[in-house]
Image: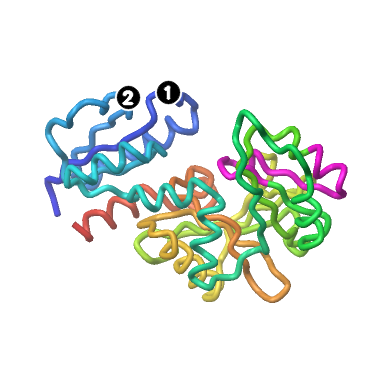
């Protein structure tokens, strides 16, 4: 479909080189594919919309704005529901578990109030009894491997929770076979378009932003099928799916609705922006 008009929605307050690089890649790809793409900051769209486009590529986590666009009849990719599920690691886990996919055993911290916090630690004892040590601790909202820790004993666990900047926390089984290594697979339109192996010699996390390394990876049929099912489970048109190496096969760790793909492009030569726009054109 030629002559399409779209908006690329980005956050108006987030100014980092890695985000600007993705914006440029999207604009270049849209131009190559004959799509008129306007970059819109979420801060510019707080009033009624003018000149509704054919689609919106929503590269932000302003879920209410995505919902407003959907209510206006605009095709939004990814949809607000997928962004909401992926943005909260607890919701991601529930969606994957509901779909029957292999995931690390997970416990959610009980809900409390920000002005009260946790006033006793009995729930940590229950988490320890279920998951043992070492135990992965994550804030529900976070990216690039940040807000993720490894507790080796109860004292460390209590200290980590005390220092967390949020009360929305989850505790996960540590997959020892995958210490310092994982796979990032990019799924677009129900197929894997590229993958990379990430590894670290110094950290239990494999994220590149945490000092990890990367190399191109040829995923197995099982890994591809699992990644596609994971993206479908959260309702994403496109997603970066992180798999761990489990004792009995791959395990889904996380699904990222707005996965940064510059590293994948540098590693494999695959431009995710091209695949996303091709998918949008074919599906419109």
Residue nearest the observer in this picture, 59 or 152: 152
- Marks 1 & 2, CB-CB < 8 Å contact: yes
Colouring method of the image: rainbow
Residue 96, magenta (yes or no) = no
The image quadrant that residue 66 belongs to is: top left
Q: Is residue 184 above or below residue 26?
A: below
Query: Which residue is denoted by mark 1 in the rendering?
Result: 13
* Residue 13 x/y as whole percent: 42, 23
Query: Which residue is denoted by mark 2 in the rendering?
Result: 43
Q: Residue at x 52, y 47 (%)?
A: 88
Residue nearest the observer in this picture, 93 or 274: 93
- Answer left or right for 229 relative to 197: left
- Answer left or right for 236 relative to 163: left
* Residue 186 x/y as whole percent: 47, 57
Residue nearest the observer in this picture, 262 or 164: 164
Magenta stretch: give its range. Answer: 138-159
Residue 157, magenta (yes or no) = yes
């Amino acid at each position: 479909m030629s002559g399409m008009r779209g908006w690329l929605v980005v956050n108006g307050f987030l100014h980092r080189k890695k985000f600007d690089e993705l914006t440029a890649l999207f604009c270049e790809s849209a131009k190559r594919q004959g799509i008129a793409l306007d970059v819109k900051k979420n801060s510019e769209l707080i009033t009624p919309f003018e000149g509704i486009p054919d689609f919106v590529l929503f590269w932000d986590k302003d879920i209410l704005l995505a919902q407003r666009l959907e209510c206006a009849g605009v095709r939004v990719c990814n949809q607000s529901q997928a962004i909401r599920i992926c943005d909260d690691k607890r919701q991601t886990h529930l969606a994957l578990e509901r779909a029957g996919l292999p995931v690390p055993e997970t416990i959610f911290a009980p809900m409390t109030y920000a002005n009260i916090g946790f006033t006793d630690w009995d729930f940590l004892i229950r988490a320890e009894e279920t998951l043992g040590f070492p135990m992965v601790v994550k804030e529900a909202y976070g990216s690039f491997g940040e807000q993720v820790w490894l507790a080796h004993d109860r004292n460390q666990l209590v200290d980590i929770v005390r220092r967390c900047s949020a009360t929305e926390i989850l505790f996960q089984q540590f997959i020892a076979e995958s210490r310092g290594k994982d796979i990032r697979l990019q799924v677009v339109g129900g197929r894997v378009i590229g993958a990379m192996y990430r590894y670290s010699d110094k950290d239990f996390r494999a994220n590149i932003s945490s000092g990890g390394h990367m190399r191109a990876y040829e995923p197995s049929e099982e890994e591809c099928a699992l990644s596609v099912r994971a993206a479908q489970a959260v309702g994403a048109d496109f997603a970066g799916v992180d798999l761990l190496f489990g004792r009995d096969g791959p395990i889904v760790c996380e699904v990222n609705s707005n996965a940064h793909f510059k590293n994948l492009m540098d590693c494999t030569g695959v431009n995710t922006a091209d695949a996303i726009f091709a998918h949008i054109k074919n599906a419109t």
